Amino acid sequence: MVVGGAEPFYRNGLRFSCTRCSVCCRHESGYVFLSQKDIRILVAALQMGYNDVIETYCRWVPVKYREDRLSLQETAGYDCIFWKDGCSVYAGRPLQCRAFPFWPSLLVSPETWSQGALSCPGMGTGVLHTRDAIERWVSRQRVEPLIVRRS
């Protein structure tokens, strides 16, 4: 992820260990955008039909003019629809959840990483993730296309 010839700020890796605090899953509105692969994994984890998973657990979110993306629903209290004293589909959770905090939006600069760390106690502590490992997460997020509906 070298931009303009400059080395990324995380060239020596970044520390992160999930503390299972669930801050990323609860109490704040957000979107967990889904790919076809995410839905297939959820179908298997939930032992439901493809359309049933979408109708029961998903919503369409407008992101651009005449374009919506499929996202997980959230509860009235802004918890992820799968939060039940922990992630009820942890083994089958979407890529966006598995890749956290190695999202392109958090890897722009040391400042964006630090901003994310203000709400996530696991960022900046624990296991050292190498630059290669981080870039594999970023690459996976770029190659798995999100489900889009155009109107």
Image (tube, rainbow, N blue to C red):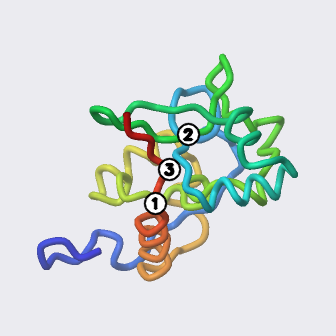
Residue 39 located left or right of residue 12: right
* Inter-mark Cα distance, 2 to 3: 9 Å
In this view of the protein, which residue sits in the foreground, 6 or 93? 93
Outermost bottom residue: 132
Tell me the crowding category of disc 3: few under 14, some 14 to 19, or many 20 or more residues within 10 angstroms, Cα based: some
Residue at horizontal 55 percent and vertical 61 percent from the top? 99
Residue 25: x percent and y percent?
Answer: 64, 39
Residue 142 located left or right of residue 93: left
- Numbered disc in front, either 2 or 3: 3
* Inter-mark Cα distance, 3 to 1: 7 Å
The circle drawn on residue 71 is 2
How many numbered marks are there?
3
Outermost top residue: 76
Residue at horizontal 87 percent and vertical 52 percent from the top? 47
Provide the secondary structure element on which disc 1 rests: loop
Provide the secondary structure element on which disc 2 rests: strand
Residue 5 position by quadrant: bottom left
Outermost left residue: 4
Residue 59: x percent and y percent?
Answer: 58, 31
Tell me the crowding category of disc 1: few under 14, some 14 to 19, or many 20 or more residues within 10 angstroms, Cα based: few
The residue to which callout 1 is attached is: 145
Residue at horizontal 51 percent and vertical 39 percent from the top? 119
> Please, what is the three-letter code of the amino acid marked with disc 2?
Ser
> Please, what is the three-letter code of the amino acid marked with disc 3?
Ile
> Please, what is the three-letter code of the amino acid marked with disc 1?
Pro
The residue to which callout 3 is attached is: 147
Residue 7 position by quadrant: bottom left
Asked if the residues shown at circle 3 and circle 1 are in contact, with their CB atoms under 8 angstroms apart, the answer is yes
